[in-house]
Amino acid sequence: MDRRETIRSLAAGGMLLPGLLSELMAEQGGPSNPLAPRPTHFAPKAKQVIFLFMTGGVSHMDTFDPCEGLNSRHDREQRKGWYYKGTGWKFRPRGECGTEVSDLFPHIGSMMDDICLIRSMTNINGDHFGATIGIHTGSATFNRPSIGSWVSYGLGTENSDLPAFMVISEGLPYAGGQVWGSDFLPATHQGTRVIPGRAPIANVNRSGSPQEQKTELDLLSFLNRQHLKGRESDSRLAARIQSFETAAGMQLAAPDVFDLSGESAHTHRMYGLTPGDTEGFAWQCMVARRMIERGVRFVELIDGDSGVDRNWDAHAELRKYDQLARNVDQPIAALLKDLKARGLLDETLVVFTTEFGRTPFVQSPGTDGRGHHARVYSTWLAGAGIKGGIVHGASDELGDRVAKDEVGVHDLQATILHLLGMDHERLTYRHAGRDFRLTDVHGNVVTDILS
């Protein structure tokens, strides 16, 4: 009996755990573990990413871009039927760097010495759906894998008991699950959605005893391997088998991630989270840090959903920004402080973005709202490999167009991959007869913001 037959015999007898079986089968030329750690193209600055996405289009001139000439033109006619609209919030210099941030974000403002603020961001689409998938997938018109899926595919995970890509979202953003979908990449790389609440991941608890579950998994593993014979080249089957193995591991690892009872009272106060709460953006931020500690490669936190009254879409009600900002300001600043205190910010890239900004003009004086504006808005980054305390690029004095150093979505994506040690032009996947990549045929690394 050769080694391959021995392995199969042991599998049939239920004597090998599923994860161990896939590793041994890989040695024998069978399908390898698609989530196994993979080498980078060059030395990385970052090991992990926390991607903070504000659904709805955050108004740049009310938050991170003072647009000096706008308030002086408030309610003045720009052209027939359109009027300039100034901001209702005061901007102040923050930190030693003196970067101006509005009073909506005093806590994030206090961290500007660690943040690189980009005031020249643009998107490839001005519609919520197209802009949302554009910044996540690089395409505003076609289904493509999410950036988190690309990172999972390119790097794998250091913790086989947890998915490489996890998404925490109370509601569905514009574009829904496409935001974390793997599309043509192996299904293993799709994001695992966590819904804040008492049961963040459904069915994560065992339905029977450990021994009963082991018997079921052993049988499942045997049947899967029998079906895989002769089909080893089908990545979908390998991904499907791997998903069961990851699910089994999550039953051990996931409850610990979501158990915040061991977090100190000081940490809860810092995030603004009441002990025992399992909802809200503060909970999302604390759980994100715990995921990063346990080796999750890419964590996305989504604030808001596609319901207009529950996101940053402000066609007619900018007043809601006061509450929306309070919900995220303290938790995000606490996340940065917490990562920094634990030595994790040096290896974690934090990205704060949205799908587009808002218009500097409205149809009539006194309008409490702004329209979609994809040709310039604000984004910021902090952490591994990023110069803190700087502003990159600028809008014009009205916040209408890019004045210098434009950064498109593909440039942002190329920069994120670069910090993770991957060349965006070399990270490709063959599909439908050609090589695809996250940045399509575009994208340049924004070298001026790198430390």
Image: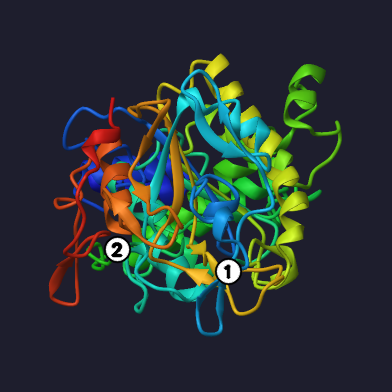
Give the side of residue 195 with respect to residue 380, left or right. right
Residue 141 appears at what percent x and percent y?
35, 79
Q: Name the residue carrying label 1.
A: 76
Give the foreground label among 1 and 2: 1
Q: Nearer the viewer, residue 18 or 4?
A: 18
Q: Nearer the viewer, residue 264 or 349?
A: 349
Rendered residue at 67%/73% (across/down): 365
Rendered residue at 42%/52% (across/down): 397
Using the image, determine if residue 10 lies above or below residue 128. Answer: above
Q: Label 2 amino acid?
A: Ser
Q: Label 1 amino acid?
A: Arg
Quadrant in the picture for the C terminus:
top left
Q: Nearer the viewer, residue 268 or 124?
A: 124
Disc assigned to residue 339 = none
Residue 377 appears at what percent x and percent y?
45, 56
Give the side of residue 364 with respect to residue 23, left or right. right
Judge whether residue 226 can be spotted in this image. Answer: no
Using the image, determine if residue 233 lies above or below residue 391. Answer: below
Neighbour tally class for label 2: few under 14, some 14-19, many 20 plus, Cα within 10 Å: some
Q: Quadrant of residue 293?
A: top right
Residue 316 appears at what percent x and percent y?
70, 72
Q: Earlier in the sequence, mark 1 or mark 2?
A: 1
Neighbour tally class for label 1: few under 14, some 14-19, many 20 plus, Cα within 10 Å: some
Quadrant in the picture for the N terminus:
top left
Q: Name the residue carrying label 2.
A: 235
| In contact (CB < 8 Å): disc 1 and disc 2 | no
Q: Measure the alpha-carbon separation of dots 1 and 2.
A: 60 Å
